[in-house]
Image (cartoon, rainbow, N blue to C red):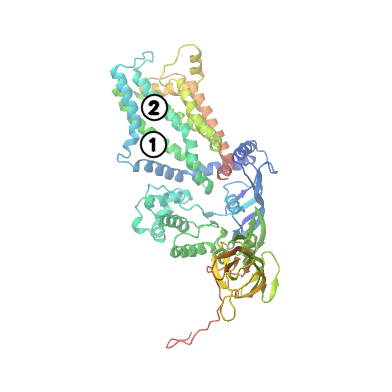
Amino acid sequence: MHVTVYTPASALRDPWLMLRSMFADLRASGELAWSLARRDIKAQYRQSLFGYVWAFIMPLSTTVAWVYLNSSGIVKVTNTGMPYAIYALTGTLLWQMFTEALNSPLAQLNGAKNLLAKLSFPREALILSGIIKWWFNVGIKLLIIIPALFLLGGAPDWHMVLVPLILVAILLIGTAIGLFIAPVGLLYTDVGRMIPVVLQFAMYVTPVVFAMPASGFAAVLFRINFMTPVIVNGRAWLVGSGGSMHTELALICGAALVLLFLSWLLFRTTMSVLIERMSA
Amino acid sequence: MEQDVLIKVEGVSKKFCRDLKTSLRYGMADVRDEVLGRPRTMDLRPKEFWAVSDIGFELRRGECLGLIGHNGAGKTTLLKVLNGLIKPDTGRIEIHGQVGALIALGAGFNPILTARENIYINASVLGLSKKLVDERIDEIIAFAEIEEFIDMPVQHFSSGMSVRLGFAVAAILIEPDILFLDEVLAVGDINFMIKCLNRVRELMRTSAVVFVSHNMPLITSFCTRVIVMDHGHSVMDTEEIGVAVNHYFGLAKNSVQISGTGEASVLDLRLAANGVAVESETPTIQQGQELTATLRVKIGEGQTAEINVTISDASLTGLLNIPVKNERGEGIELGPGEHEVQVPLGLLELNAGLYTFMVGIRHSATNVTLCRHQGLQPFRVHADRVHWTSFVRTSVSKVLEPKGAKVQ
């Protein structure tokens, strides 16, 4: 018979047991994660006439806006090495994917406060279900973006097969950071308010809608920004070129993987403390 | 047998903080300690109190432990610690086997989705597989009595229907070794409630149950053992359920409320059971004894007054009215001054529980209320079994000779 023991001691005191239960819970949370993700996606679109069409509207409107700006000649940014509309569209969509991945853990936990306070289930399911929803949204964005690239005069080629790699990288970095700040974010709403502020600033020092500055203070900021290689390569592979800063990209992914694992540990060890504070 | 012990709780305590901002700060400190693997501080920090203090028990399969106590006594918190939602601050808990909980019925329901979809979601939140639901969904629908609404969004359900659905999902699917129940049995109408109770009894046969409730009839009919909690402490732990329930009623705060013109007052009300005076603040009287009240009243100058005595339950709802009459059935008129009046109350046929007196004195001609004392002389009625009704009369019945039927 399965025996569970609860004591005041920190779970970190027995790392081996903790690791085993972490992976056991991760395996156990698959079905629940799917179920919750399906619930949220279905419920999101059911109470509307157009249903799932809405999922396409947001990325589509962004795309249409850039196609229009491009064809009307309102924007003329030339030092990007490609039509500016393509530059901005790919940048924006990749950046959106990143912010969604980063916001997801805290949003998922906040949305399930009631469940967390009352029921015992593998908490990883909430994070996983956020990831499933993220892939759903990313899939829709890609369905829009790829035809749009041809429309805007781009020439995607075999590099497209590398795009899933960049998606995984974005998910990895976003989730790692998102999960890292989630425990404190559950206690203090300040964290949730800070995220959009910081992300907005971060977007301007990442080559999302602006080109990389060649020199000066801004160039340094762009260089040390860990999202720069991700966006640069993501965009490059989408439009059919090899990209650059591959070593940096690999290093960043490795670091994100480590951070993700640490965040997971943090999440596991602190969850009961946080639940106590939110139900008290 | 030692291996039959399914829940083992030793010296479990849990502290809470009264103040939100401070609580969040302590939360951060606890997060830091957890991450550094440091032991938690045992002492109470400012504004903290023990919500659960030094609770210990062992529970075997087939046993049902009732946790009773007034709001804020720590019952639900203890249940959360047992369920692993929050960590104990001291002590140790050992849980053997599969845990099922009938808490937070309908968890994860999304109002937009249909009942059928929600059954699957609710089940997966409870850790039950889709396959299991596939096998038993008809049973769930039948139990919840929502056949014709199964594909309707839950938001159009009446509250009773969604509670029934929530209960049915959990109660049909779980097969726990350990069952936690928190005030969820009193759901739906009486027919459904009986169905729930019967289902819980089935589950109880094969599990160890911890049952939190304020419903004393349920406690006495389900529990094999009761812990009475007060301010986080276990103040009584006994297998004599009636004694525990009686103790619980004794924890209630009582206050006397006085209204009226003030031209009369009740000085004193004393009780005697079977002719013996009872001297205690909230005496316990055995069900079935003969009860007598002796009132001392003072009537103001120029008044003639009549007295009326009422026995009220713990919520001050009047149960039994005893107009004070003489042997001819006429109201006794009292003139100015102090009087002592003996009022026989008859056999004590009240259900086990806490009761108080309400004494009203009104002007005999004008009916003006001179005084009305509510919550006077609380007393407890003790019995082994708490019934659902206000009154309990033990009958002496006999089986009549059947006509034409075969005697077994």
**First reached walking from the N terminus: tag 2 or tag 1:** 2
For label 2, the crowd category at 10 Å Cα-Cα, with few meaning under 14, some 14 to 19 and many 20 or more, is many
Q: Quadrant of the N terminus of chain B?
A: bottom right
Drawn side of residue A42 relative to residue B174, left or right: left
Q: Where is residue A147 in the image (x, y as percent from the top left)?
A: 30, 27
* Nearer to the camera, B390 or B293: B293
In the rendered image, which quarter is residue B316 located in?
bottom right
Q: Is residue A262 above or below residue B216?
A: above
Q: Which numbered circle lies on residue A136?
A: 1
Label 1: how many residues lie within 10 Å, few (<14), some (14-19) or many (20+)?
some
Q: Mark 1 lies on which chain?
A: A
Residue B119 visible in image: yes
B207 left or right of A169 in image: right
Q: Where is residue A14 in the image (x, y as percent from the top left)?
A: 63, 41
Element assignment for label 2: helix
Which disc number belongs to residue B355?
Answer: none
- Residue type beneath disc 1: Phe
Q: Which residue is labeled 2 in the image? A: A93
